[in-house]
Image (tube, rainbow, N blue to C red):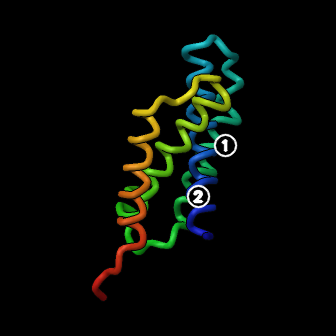
Amino acid sequence: MNTVLIYAGAAAAEIAGCFAVWAWMRQGASAFWLVPGSVSLGVFAWLLTLAPSDFAGRSYAAYGGVYITASLGWLWAVEKQHPDTWDLTGAAICLIGAAIILWAPRAA
C-alpha cells in the first residue's frame, strides 16, 4: 500500500508541476506559476526515489501506469472533460502492466 501512495503522490506532483508550465506557455498564466511548478516537479522526483525497487528504470516503468491513470483523473477533475471508454480501457491495461512490473516475483 505504501508503494501505491508513493506513486499517487508522485503523479499528483508531476501533473501539477507540468500543468504549471502548460498554464504559463499555453494559457497565458504568469511566469510566477513556474515557481510552485518547479517545487512540485522536485517533490515528484524525490518521491520516486522512495519507490521500493532496486532499479530506477523498473520503478519508472511501473510508475508510468499510475501516471497515465492520474492524468485521466486530472482531465476529469480539473479540466472538466470526462475520460471516454477508450481512455479508461487504456488506463486499465497500463495499470495491469504496472502491477506486473512492480510486483512480479523476481529471481534472486
Disc on res. 46 = 2
User: In the current view of this chain or complex, which residue is farthest to the top?
Assistant: 28
Q: Which amino acid does label 1 sit on?
A: Val
From the top left corner, tell me how far across and down residue 67 is, in percent: 50, 46
Up-down: is 76 above or below 5? above
Q: Which residue is drawn at 52% across and 30% down?
A: 83
Mark 2: few/some/many CA within 10 Å (<14, 14-19, 20+): few
Q: Residue at x 36, y 74 (%)?
A: 104
Res 55 quadrant in image: bottom left
Label 1: element kind: helix
Res 60 quadrant in image: bottom left
From the top left corner, tell me how far across and down residue 3 is, in percent: 56, 67
In the shown orientation, is residue 96 left or right of residue 40? left
Up-down: is 19 above or below 39? above
Q: Number of callouts in the render?
A: 2
- Sequence-wise, which precedes: disc 2 or disc 1? 1
Q: How much space separates mark 2 and mark 1, taking CA atoms?
A: 11 Å
Label 2: element kind: helix
From the top left corner, tell me how far across and down residue 10 is, in percent: 58, 52
Which image quarter is the C terminus in? bottom left
Mark 1: few/some/many CA within 10 Å (<14, 14-19, 20+): some
From the top left corner, tell me how far across and down residue 88 is, in percent: 46, 39
Which image quarter is the N terminus in? bottom right
Q: What residue type is labelled 2?
A: Trp
Identify the residue position indicated by label 1 in the image: 39
Disc on res. 68 = none
Q: Which residue is drawn at 36% across and 66% down?
A: 100
- In this rendered view, identify the residue nearer to me: 45 or 15: 15
